[in-house]
Protein backbone atom coordinates (compact mmCIF):
# COMPACT_ATOMS: atom_id res chain seq x y z
CA UNK A 1 0.00 0.00 0.00
CA UNK A 2 1.36 3.42 -0.93
CA UNK A 3 1.98 5.68 2.05
CA UNK A 4 -0.43 8.60 2.13
CA UNK A 5 1.22 12.00 1.90
CA UNK A 6 0.25 14.71 4.35
CA UNK A 7 -0.70 18.35 3.89
CA UNK A 8 0.48 21.46 5.78
CA UNK A 9 -1.39 22.09 9.03
CA UNK A 10 -2.57 25.42 7.66
CA UNK A 11 -4.46 23.48 4.98
CA UNK A 12 -6.07 21.31 7.67
CA UNK A 13 -7.43 24.42 9.37
CA UNK A 14 -8.66 25.84 6.04
CA UNK A 15 -10.40 22.58 5.21
CA UNK A 16 -12.11 22.52 8.62
CA UNK A 17 -13.38 26.08 8.12
CA UNK A 18 -14.82 25.10 4.74
CA UNK A 19 -16.62 22.09 6.25
CA UNK A 20 -18.03 24.24 9.07
CA UNK A 21 -19.32 26.75 6.53
CA UNK A 22 -21.12 24.12 4.47
CA UNK A 23 -22.71 22.44 7.50
CA UNK A 24 -23.91 25.83 8.76
CA UNK A 25 -26.05 26.20 5.61
CA UNK A 26 -28.41 23.61 7.08
CA UNK A 27 -27.61 23.23 10.78
CA UNK A 28 -28.38 26.08 13.16
CA UNK A 29 -26.05 26.20 16.15
CA UNK A 30 -24.36 22.99 17.35
CA UNK A 31 -20.93 24.51 16.68
CA UNK A 32 -19.31 22.48 19.46
CA UNK A 33 -20.81 19.24 18.11
CA UNK A 34 -19.54 20.00 14.60
CA UNK A 35 -16.06 20.73 15.97
CA UNK A 36 -16.03 17.40 17.80
CA UNK A 37 -17.10 15.63 14.61
CA UNK A 38 -14.19 17.29 12.81
CA UNK A 39 -11.77 16.21 15.55
CA UNK A 40 -13.08 12.65 15.38
CA UNK A 41 -12.73 12.65 11.59
CA UNK A 42 -9.09 13.77 11.75
CA UNK A 43 -8.31 11.45 14.66
CA UNK A 44 -10.04 8.60 12.80
CA UNK A 45 -12.47 7.93 15.65
CA UNK A 46 -16.19 7.24 16.02
CA UNK A 47 -18.89 9.40 17.63
CA UNK A 48 -22.01 8.64 19.66
CA UNK A 49 -24.62 11.42 19.60
CA UNK A 50 -27.18 11.40 22.39
CA UNK A 51 -30.10 13.81 22.53
CA UNK A 52 -33.89 14.06 22.56
CA UNK A 53 -35.88 13.52 19.37
CA UNK A 54 -36.02 16.41 16.91
CA UNK A 55 -32.61 17.91 17.69
CA UNK A 56 -31.26 17.14 14.18
CA UNK A 57 -28.81 14.41 15.16
CA UNK A 58 -29.52 12.37 12.03
CA UNK A 59 -29.67 15.42 9.77
CA UNK A 60 -26.37 16.68 11.16
CA UNK A 61 -24.68 13.38 10.26
CA UNK A 62 -26.15 13.52 6.74
CA UNK A 63 -24.97 17.10 6.21
CA UNK A 64 -21.53 16.35 7.62
CA UNK A 65 -21.10 13.42 5.22
CA UNK A 66 -22.31 15.52 2.29
CA UNK A 67 -19.53 18.07 2.86
CA UNK A 68 -16.85 15.38 2.84
CA UNK A 69 -17.58 13.75 -0.51
CA UNK A 70 -17.78 10.36 1.21
CA UNK A 71 -19.95 7.34 0.53
CA UNK A 72 -22.71 7.66 3.13
CA UNK A 73 -24.53 4.66 4.58
CA UNK A 74 -27.41 4.52 7.02
CA UNK A 75 -28.78 1.71 9.18
CA UNK A 76 -32.01 2.19 11.08
CA UNK A 77 -31.55 -0.03 14.11
CA UNK A 78 -34.66 -1.97 15.15
CA UNK A 79 -35.30 -4.87 17.55
CA UNK A 80 -35.55 -7.40 14.69
CA UNK A 81 -32.32 -6.32 12.94
CA UNK A 82 -29.88 -9.20 12.41
CA UNK A 83 -26.06 -9.06 12.05
CA UNK A 84 -26.37 -10.11 8.40
CA UNK A 85 -28.55 -7.06 7.75
CA UNK A 86 -25.54 -4.92 8.69
CA UNK A 87 -22.58 -6.90 7.38
CA UNK A 88 -24.06 -8.72 4.39
CA UNK A 89 -23.67 -12.39 3.58
CA UNK A 90 -22.30 -14.91 1.09
CA UNK A 91 -25.11 -16.14 -1.16
CA UNK A 92 -24.85 -19.17 -3.41
CA UNK A 93 -25.12 -18.35 -7.10
CA UNK A 94 -26.67 -21.35 -8.87
CA UNK A 95 -25.57 -20.07 -12.30
CA UNK A 96 -21.88 -19.96 -11.38
CA UNK A 97 -22.02 -22.59 -8.59
CA UNK A 98 -20.08 -20.20 -6.38
CA UNK A 99 -20.77 -18.09 -3.35
CA UNK A 100 -21.03 -14.35 -4.02
CA UNK A 101 -20.59 -11.69 -1.39
CA UNK A 102 -23.62 -9.44 -0.96
CA UNK A 103 -22.27 -6.43 0.91
CA UNK A 104 -24.30 -4.91 3.71
CA UNK A 105 -24.69 -1.17 4.35
CA UNK A 106 -21.62 -1.16 6.59
CA UNK A 107 -19.46 -1.11 3.46
CA UNK A 108 -19.29 2.67 3.16
CA UNK A 109 -17.11 5.60 4.26
CA UNK A 110 -19.35 7.19 6.90
CA UNK A 111 -22.01 5.03 8.54
CA UNK A 112 -24.96 6.51 10.41
CA UNK A 113 -26.09 3.99 13.02
CA UNK A 114 -29.46 5.54 13.79
CA UNK A 115 -30.97 4.74 17.21
CA UNK A 116 -28.26 2.17 17.83
CA UNK A 117 -29.66 1.21 21.25
CA UNK A 118 -32.88 -0.15 19.74
CA UNK A 119 -31.28 -3.39 18.60
CA UNK A 120 -30.19 -6.36 20.78
CA UNK A 121 -26.53 -6.72 21.89
CA UNK A 122 -25.91 -9.57 19.43
CA UNK A 123 -26.61 -7.23 16.52
CA UNK A 124 -24.80 -4.30 18.13
CA UNK A 125 -21.73 -6.54 18.38
CA UNK A 126 -21.63 -6.80 14.59
CA UNK A 127 -20.03 -3.35 14.62
CA UNK A 128 -17.18 -4.20 16.99
CA UNK A 129 -14.64 -5.50 14.48
CA UNK A 130 -15.49 -2.81 11.94
CA UNK A 131 -15.05 0.00 14.46
CA UNK A 132 -11.79 -1.31 15.88
CA UNK A 133 -10.02 -2.90 12.91
CA UNK A 134 -11.92 -1.36 9.97
CA UNK A 135 -12.68 -4.70 8.42
CA UNK A 136 -15.54 -7.20 8.27
CA UNK A 137 -15.09 -10.97 8.53
CA UNK A 138 -17.67 -13.14 6.78
CA UNK A 139 -17.34 -16.92 6.70
CA UNK A 140 -13.71 -16.66 7.75
CA UNK A 141 -12.73 -14.18 5.05
CA UNK A 142 -11.71 -10.62 5.97
CA UNK A 143 -13.03 -7.74 3.86
CA UNK A 144 -11.35 -4.36 4.44
CA UNK A 145 -13.26 -1.14 5.00
CA UNK A 146 -11.92 2.29 3.98
CA UNK A 147 -9.08 3.61 6.12
CA UNK A 148 -11.23 6.64 7.02
CA UNK A 149 -14.31 4.53 7.88
CA UNK A 150 -16.28 6.36 10.57
CA UNK A 151 -19.39 5.49 12.57
CA UNK A 152 -21.72 8.23 13.80
CA UNK A 153 -24.33 6.62 16.05
CA UNK A 154 -27.39 8.24 17.61
CA UNK A 155 -29.48 7.34 20.60
CA UNK A 156 -32.39 8.85 22.50
CA UNK A 157 -31.86 9.20 26.28
CA UNK A 158 -35.53 9.74 27.11
CA UNK A 159 -37.13 6.42 26.19
CA UNK A 160 -36.51 3.33 28.30
CA UNK A 161 -38.96 0.93 26.61
CA UNK A 162 -37.63 -1.26 23.79
CA UNK A 163 -34.02 -0.15 24.12
CA UNK A 164 -30.85 -2.10 24.93
CA UNK A 165 -27.97 -0.36 26.72
CA UNK A 166 -24.77 -0.48 24.69
CA UNK A 167 -22.21 -3.00 26.02
CA UNK A 168 -19.10 -1.50 27.61
CA UNK A 169 -16.93 -3.07 24.89
CA UNK A 170 -18.82 -1.14 22.24
CA UNK A 171 -18.98 2.12 24.18
CA UNK A 172 -15.21 1.96 24.59
CA UNK A 173 -14.79 2.01 20.80
CA UNK A 174 -16.42 5.43 20.49
CA UNK A 175 -13.96 8.29 20.71
CA UNK A 176 -16.64 10.76 21.86
CA UNK A 177 -20.07 10.67 23.39
CA UNK A 178 -21.64 14.04 22.63
CA UNK A 179 -24.79 15.35 24.29
CA UNK A 180 -26.96 17.23 21.79
CA UNK A 181 -29.13 19.70 23.73
CA UNK A 182 -32.25 21.58 22.74
CA UNK A 183 -31.44 24.82 20.86
CA UNK A 184 -31.49 28.21 22.53
CA UNK A 185 -34.49 30.52 22.09
CA UNK A 186 -32.74 32.48 19.35
CA UNK A 187 -31.55 29.34 17.55
CA UNK A 188 -34.99 27.76 17.67
CA UNK A 189 -36.52 30.89 16.14
CA UNK A 190 -33.96 30.71 13.31
CA UNK A 191 -34.77 27.02 12.77
CA UNK A 192 -38.49 27.78 12.45
CA UNK A 193 -37.82 30.71 10.10
CA UNK A 194 -35.56 28.56 7.91
CA UNK A 195 -37.62 25.37 7.75
CA UNK A 196 -41.14 26.37 8.81
CA UNK A 197 -42.43 26.78 5.26
CA UNK A 198 -41.27 23.37 4.06
CA UNK A 199 -43.84 20.63 3.65
CA UNK A 200 -41.26 17.88 4.27
CA UNK A 201 -37.66 17.34 5.31
CA UNK A 202 -34.99 18.89 3.13
CA UNK A 203 -31.95 17.07 1.83
CA UNK A 204 -28.43 18.49 2.17
CA UNK A 205 -28.28 19.00 -1.60
CA UNK A 206 -31.52 21.01 -1.59
CA UNK A 207 -30.01 23.31 1.02
CA UNK A 208 -26.97 23.96 -1.14
CA UNK A 209 -24.48 21.77 0.71
CA UNK A 210 -21.69 20.58 -1.56
CA UNK A 211 -18.59 18.47 -1.02
CA UNK A 212 -15.55 20.59 -0.19
CA UNK A 213 -13.05 17.73 -0.02
CA UNK A 214 -12.52 14.11 -1.04
CA UNK A 215 -11.23 10.89 0.56
CA UNK A 216 -7.64 11.45 -0.58
CA UNK A 217 -7.47 14.92 0.94
CA UNK A 218 -9.06 13.69 4.16
CA UNK A 219 -6.45 10.95 4.45
CA UNK A 220 -3.70 13.52 3.87
CA UNK A 221 -5.16 15.73 6.60
CA UNK A 222 -5.35 12.79 9.02
CA UNK A 223 -1.73 11.99 8.21
CA UNK A 224 -0.74 15.59 9.00
CA UNK A 225 -2.47 15.34 12.38
CA UNK A 226 -0.32 12.33 13.28
CA UNK A 227 2.72 14.60 12.96
CA UNK A 228 1.53 17.00 15.66
CA UNK A 229 4.01 16.96 18.55
CA UNK A 230 2.85 15.34 21.78
CA UNK A 231 5.45 16.11 24.46
CA UNK A 232 6.32 13.53 27.10
CA UNK A 233 4.93 15.85 29.78
CA UNK A 234 1.54 15.96 28.02
CA UNK A 235 1.54 12.18 27.57
CA UNK A 236 2.20 11.84 31.29
CA UNK A 237 -0.71 14.23 31.98
CA UNK A 238 -3.09 12.21 29.80
CA UNK A 239 -2.10 8.95 31.49
CA UNK A 240 -2.39 10.38 35.01
CA UNK A 241 -5.83 11.83 34.23
CA UNK A 242 -7.13 8.53 32.85
CA UNK A 243 -5.63 6.52 35.71
CA UNK A 244 -7.28 8.88 38.19
CA UNK A 245 -10.68 7.61 37.00
CA UNK A 246 -9.72 4.12 38.21
CA UNK A 247 -8.74 5.38 41.64
CA UNK A 248 -11.86 7.47 42.36
CA UNK A 249 -14.09 6.10 45.11
CA UNK A 250 -17.11 7.52 43.27
CA UNK A 251 -16.48 5.39 40.19
CA UNK A 252 -17.08 1.65 40.07
CA UNK A 253 -15.26 1.37 36.75
CA UNK A 254 -12.63 3.68 35.30
CA UNK A 255 -11.39 4.34 31.79
CA UNK A 256 -9.28 1.87 29.81
CA UNK A 257 -5.81 2.40 28.28
CA UNK A 258 -7.64 2.76 24.96
CA UNK A 259 -9.23 5.91 26.38
CA UNK A 260 -5.78 7.40 27.01
CA UNK A 261 -4.68 6.63 23.45
CA UNK A 262 -7.84 8.09 21.95
CA UNK A 263 -7.67 11.20 24.14
CA UNK A 264 -4.10 11.83 23.01
CA UNK A 265 -5.05 11.37 19.34
CA UNK A 266 -8.03 13.70 19.71
CA UNK A 267 -5.83 16.32 21.39
CA UNK A 268 -3.51 16.21 18.37
CA UNK A 269 -6.48 16.82 16.05
CA UNK A 270 -7.73 19.73 18.18
CA UNK A 271 -4.28 21.31 18.08
CA UNK A 272 -4.21 20.98 14.27
CA UNK A 273 -7.63 22.63 13.97
CA UNK A 274 -6.23 25.48 16.05
CA UNK A 275 -3.28 25.82 13.68
CA UNK A 276 -0.69 24.43 16.11
CA UNK A 277 1.83 21.65 15.51
CA UNK A 278 2.01 20.81 19.22
CA UNK A 279 -0.48 19.77 21.91
CA UNK A 280 -1.05 21.85 25.04
CA UNK A 281 -2.77 20.68 28.25
CA UNK A 282 -5.83 22.78 27.39
CA UNK A 283 -6.43 20.50 24.38
CA UNK A 284 -6.64 17.54 26.76
CA UNK A 285 -8.85 19.39 29.24
CA UNK A 286 -11.28 20.52 26.54
CA UNK A 287 -11.85 16.97 25.26
CA UNK A 288 -11.57 14.88 28.43
CA UNK A 289 -15.27 14.92 29.35
CA UNK A 290 -16.44 13.90 25.87
CA UNK A 291 -13.85 11.10 25.76
CA UNK A 292 -14.48 9.76 29.26
CA UNK A 293 -18.18 10.22 30.10
CA UNK A 294 -19.35 7.00 28.41
CA UNK A 295 -16.49 4.92 29.78
CA UNK A 296 -17.14 5.52 33.47
CA UNK A 297 -19.63 3.82 35.81
CA UNK A 298 -20.75 5.47 39.02
CA UNK A 299 -20.41 3.54 42.26
CA UNK A 300 -23.69 2.63 44.01
CA UNK A 301 -23.01 5.21 46.71
CA UNK A 302 -22.39 7.95 44.13
CA UNK A 303 -25.62 7.05 42.35
CA UNK A 304 -27.59 7.31 45.60
CA UNK A 305 -26.03 10.71 46.24
CA UNK A 306 -27.08 11.85 42.75
CA UNK A 307 -23.58 12.56 41.50
CA UNK A 308 -22.98 13.04 37.77
CA UNK A 309 -20.13 11.55 35.73
CA UNK A 310 -19.43 14.85 34.00
CA UNK A 311 -19.00 16.66 37.32
CA UNK A 312 -16.62 13.95 38.54
CA UNK A 313 -14.51 14.25 35.39
CA UNK A 314 -14.31 18.02 35.83
CA UNK A 315 -13.21 17.49 39.42
CA UNK A 316 -10.50 15.05 38.33
CA UNK A 317 -9.28 17.58 35.76
CA UNK A 318 -8.96 20.16 38.54
CA UNK A 319 -7.18 17.72 40.83
CA UNK A 320 -4.69 16.40 38.26
CA UNK A 321 -1.73 18.70 37.93
CA UNK A 322 -1.13 19.81 34.35
CA UNK A 323 2.34 20.51 32.93
CA UNK A 324 3.31 24.15 32.48
Image (cartoon, rainbow, N blue to C red):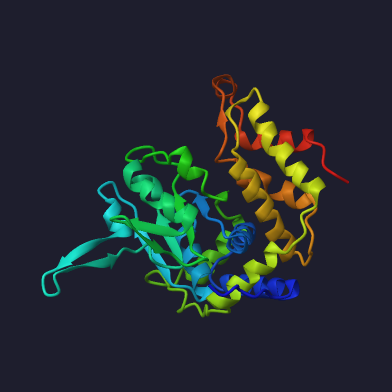
Q: Work out whether residue 7 or residue 296 is closer to the camera in this orientation and state it.
A: 7
- Asked whether the viewer can see residue 54, the reply is no
Q: Work out whether residue 31 or residue 251 is closer to the camera in this orientation and state it.
A: 251
x and y percent of residue 291 in the render?
61, 46
x and y percent of residue 129 in the render?
42, 52
Q: Residue at x 52, y 80 (%)?
A: 210
The number of numbered badges drawn on the structure is 0
- Asked whether the viewer can see residue 198, the reply is yes
x and y percent of residue 144 in the render?
42, 64
Residue 181, compared with residue 306, is above or below; it is below
Q: Residue at x 38, y 65 (%)?
A: 107
Residue that lies at the very extreme toward the left in this rendered image: 94
Q: Residue at x 66, y 55 (%)?
A: 266
In the visual, does 16 lie left or right of 27?
right
Q: Residue at x 69, y 68 (%)?
A: 224
In the visual, does 219 lie left or right of 319?
left
Residue 296 sits in which quadrant?
Answer: top right
Residue 114, compared with residue 216, is above or below; it is above
In the visual, does 234 lie left or right of 119?
right
Residue 218 sits in which quadrant?
Answer: bottom right
Amino acid sequence: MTETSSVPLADVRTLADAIRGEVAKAIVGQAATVDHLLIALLAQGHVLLEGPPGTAKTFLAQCFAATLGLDFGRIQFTPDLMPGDILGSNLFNFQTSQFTLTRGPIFCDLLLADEINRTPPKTQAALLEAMQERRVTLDGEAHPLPAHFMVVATQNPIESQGVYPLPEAQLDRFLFKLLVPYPSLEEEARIVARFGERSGPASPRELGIAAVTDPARLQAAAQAVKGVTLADSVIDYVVRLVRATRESADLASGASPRAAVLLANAARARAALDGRDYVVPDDVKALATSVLRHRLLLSPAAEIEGKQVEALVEALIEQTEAPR
